[in-house]
Image (cartoon, rainbow, N blue to C red):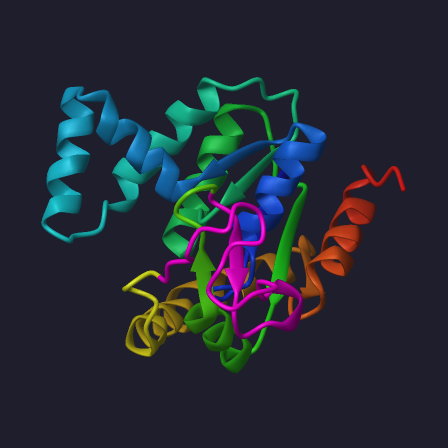
Amino acid sequence: MNIIFIAPPAAGKGTYSHLLKERYEFNHISAGEVLREVEKEGTPLGKEVSEIMARGALVDDSLMARLILDKLNKIDLNIPFIMDGYPRKLNQVKDYERILQKLNLEVTYVIFLDISKETGLKRKLGRATCPNCGKSYNINVDYLKPKQEGVCDECGSPLSIRKDDTKEAYEKLYDIYLSDTLPVIKYYEEKGKLIKLDGSEHPDIVFKEITSLLGVDNG
């Protein structure tokens, strides 16, 4: 089973991917993590990626396709896997189709976690993390707030907020989503692959819908 998560910024792709990996042992392939892994290897390819990222430039589609194919060749493809953050534009969709063809695979589901721009911004600006134990919170979402303001429920450490969680940063990400990712959503919708879920619901409800859809919901 091959799943793509696609969504506006701050819709929870990473959260639900992590839950599927943790509870059902799905493989989770994050485009960002693939780049970081290659960068750490220190190979000629890793150095090339590192130089590109150091310049603040984007890795081109052909190189990204090579990295995704390499990653897929390293995992057990009999285990369901999730693509998170790839493909994010139409050129990459075509690249990904060629990759899957080489591996005798096809996309099973494209899960679109739909949230409004306002909801995404609210989530983005409210994110807080415990630097000690890693637990995540959101001060703008009732069910994700810490019991005591600014303090981790688990270990009592002061929470930190990322400096790049700004309205300006979110606006840029959302503009990219509109220009690059909406056409991808329309493409998969026309192919009959798209499943749209309300990403603004409580995470427990959304995750229940996802596991039911994928046939792994054991109640």
The x and y percentages for residue 187 are: 55, 60
Q: Is residue 27 left or right of residue 98?
A: right
Q: Residue at x 32, y 73 (%)?
A: 166
Please state which of residues 44 and 155 is positioned toward the viewer in this rendering: 155
The x and y percentages for residue 154 are: 57, 47
Residue projecting furthest to the bottom: 118
Q: Residue at x 75, y 56 (%)?
A: 204
Q: Is residue 164 left or right of residue 202?
A: left
Name the main secondary structure of what is drawn in magenta.
loop
Magenta stretch containing residue 137, yes or no? yes
Which range of residues does the magenta coloring cover? 134-161
Residue projecting furthest to the right: 219
Magenta stretch containing residue 98, yes or no? no
The x and y percentages for residue 33 are: 38, 37
In the rendered view of the protein, which quadrant contains the C terminus? top right
Residue 34, above or below 145 = above
Q: Image quarter for residue 217?
A: top right
Q: Residue at x 56, y 57 (%)?
A: 12
Q: Is residue 219 left or right of residue 18?
A: right
The x and y percentages for residue 35 are: 30, 36
Q: Image quarter for residue 30?
A: top left
Residue 146, above or below 91 = below
Q: Residue at x 71, y 68 (%)?
A: 201
Residue 156, above or below 175 = above
Please state which of residues 102 and 162 is positioned toward the viewer in this rendering: 162
In the rendered view of the protein, which quadrant contains the N terminus? top right
How many numbered badges does the structure rendering display?
0
